[in-house]
Image (cartoon, rainbow, N blue to C red):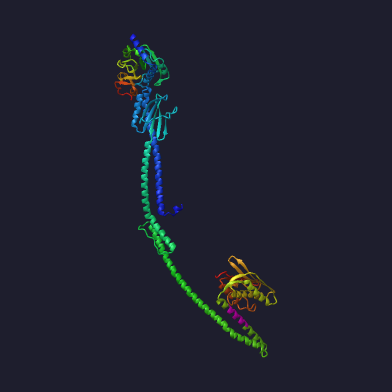
Amino acid sequence: MRFWNSQSISDKLMRMTLLVSGTALLLAYISFLVYDLYSLREELIGYLSTQASVVGANSVTALTFDDRLAAQNTLAALHSSPQIRAAVILRSDGSEFARYQRDPSTTFELKNQLSQNEPQHHWTKGRDILLGRRIQSQNTWIGTVYLLAETGDLARRAGRFGLISAGMLLLCFAIAYLATSTIRHLVTDPLTGLARTAQIVTRERDYSVRATIPLRSDELAFLVQSFNEMLEQIQARDRALESSRSELEQRVDERTAELTATNKELEAFSYSVAHDLRGPLQHINNIGFLLQHSASEGLNEEGHMLVDRLLEGSNRMSAIIDDLLNLSRASSHPLHRTTINLSHIAETIAARLQAEKDSRQLRITIAKGAQAFADEGLMQVVLENLLGNAWKYTSKLDSAEIEFGYAEEEAGTVYFVRDNGAGFNPRYADRLFRPFQRLHSQTEFTGTGVGLATAYRIIMRHGGKIWARGGVDQGATFFFTLPYGEG
Amino acid sequence: MLAACFAGSGFTQATTRAERDVEAEDLLNFGRFLRYADTPPPRSSFDLCILGQDVLDKSIDELAARETIGNLPVHVRREPDATATKSCAIVFISASESIHIREDLAILAGLDVLTVSDAPNFLDDGGMIQFVHIEKQVRFAVNLNAVNRTHLVLSSELLRVASSVRGKPAAGDLP
């Protein structure tokens, strides 16, 4: 079967044609031969029966009057029948009455005889047929005639027939070969060419090749032409795709370059603004401090209040500048990823938060063994922001609970920071990570509105995700993921 | 008469029992190959008559008892003179009758009676079938000229096995 499968269509066609015609001819030869031999044999038996009948009829008087010579003469007439080799007439008592042998040198022994009440019967002995027939006179059996005929003629006929059939078979093979060659030229050659072209197209992705179109107007020519047209269309589309892709790439490159430049400018601007603001702010702070401590005697109560508010304002501004610098750093700081233990970082931050004792009872739970592949400094910023937020928004509770943990999900590890604090309105959850967007007033909870934006920026730079769930006075949970790898 | 008796006894001596049996058998067989140009005469039995000394003994009776010819039973009659044999189908005239043969044949002339004899010169005398001895075998000779004077027809098959045939079959004979 494997051999058959590996054959080309033309070979298959050739083999099939030869096989079918050969088988058909062979079967026809066998059936004709069998029929011919059978009918010839039947014919011979019929002929023998007639001859036996004639001989019998002509031997009645010879038998009746016991005239052996007359019977011999009757049998001698069989000489004109070349098939009949020998003949014997027996009397009714079984004794031999007359005999004829074509070749006197051979002996003919009668081995089969008719049984009682059997008017006629024949036996086949090798290539010979023996036929026995009763001789009847006045409704009485007066003797039997036996004729021995050879079927050599049948064998000769079968041989001749076989020779003719072999000749016919050869002729058929020749015709089948010619037919297959024509079919090969008309059908399989264009198909092979088509297959070869398709192979080149598939293997080398070369859509410029074309199959040779046969110089005819049949289905195959149409098929090859359609195939070539299809290739042409693919080639055209390929070209268009290629040019639009390169155009797109160029455009993307341009946009990326523009964006990078703008971003850099922006970062440089915000950094320089924040940095440059520090100096004047420090001056304001110093003057405020002097006013509060050294020149406090010259100030009335209102003056004291104004100095306090001035200091408060400059402190807040200092915090905003710090956060802005952090945010800027989060965007521009190059990533140095290593395998880090987030649990350790969280524990350090938690210890610091625990130290800042206030009236509430605070319980911070840190899950052990939270590993990540990330920039340690930046992840410290993330956790400080998230844990710091949790600490801040639980400040009004008597019993605060903060938890850092992680869960192994199908997509990777999901880390979370959970608290039972003030929470937030989930409707505005999308604003949480935007810079300077705050869901609580400054009087409720102080803050700059930059911390979560910074955390968001850092997680994004790591290729991870960050999101939050919570409700008003129902606490909040911040989740984030970090892909374990470069991207 | 004496001569006839002598001749008869002489013939009897020459004819063996086996030969007599053959002759008896042949007589019956002649009946089988005997046909009539016209409608056969109405008969209730096929009568085989013997004239003269009965050389066939009882063998003919035994044979006739178990045979039928043309679906008729065969009766063997031994008659003293030719007149009594006019209704017979076959008349066997014994050689002992040789001196009366011409007279007997004259009586039977024109009648559809097959005349058979073992007498020499029987055919010359106008008889129809004569037994002859050839190479110690009983054969028979046929005189169709005598047969053709009657309505009798002898089958050509019978003629094939005859040792000799005088004359030619009449036109219209069955093959």
Looking at the image, residue B7 lies above or below residue A407: above
**Is residue A135 shown left or right of residue A318?**
left
Tell how many labels.
0
Q: Residue furthest front?
A: A105
Looking at the image, residue B109 lies above or below residue A333: above
Q: Position of residue A71 (x, y in %)?
A: 36, 25
Q: Position of residue A142 (x, y in %)?
A: 40, 24
Q: Is residue B57 visible?
A: yes
Q: Residue furthest bottom?
A: A298
Q: Which residues are magenta?
A: A315-326
Magenta stretch prevailing secondary structure: helix
Q: Position of residue A7 (x, y in %)?
A: 43, 54
Can you tell which quarter of the image residue A289 is in? bottom right
Can you tell which quarter of the image residue A91 is in? top left
Looking at the image, residue B94 lies above or below residue A184: above
Can you tell which quarter of the image residue A397 is in? bottom right
Residue, x 40% and y 43% (percent of image)? A28
* Residue nearest the observer in this picture, A105 or A298: A105
**Magenta residue check for A134:** no
Q: Position of residue B35 (x, y in %)?
A: 35, 21
Q: Quadrant of the C terminus of chain A?
A: bottom right
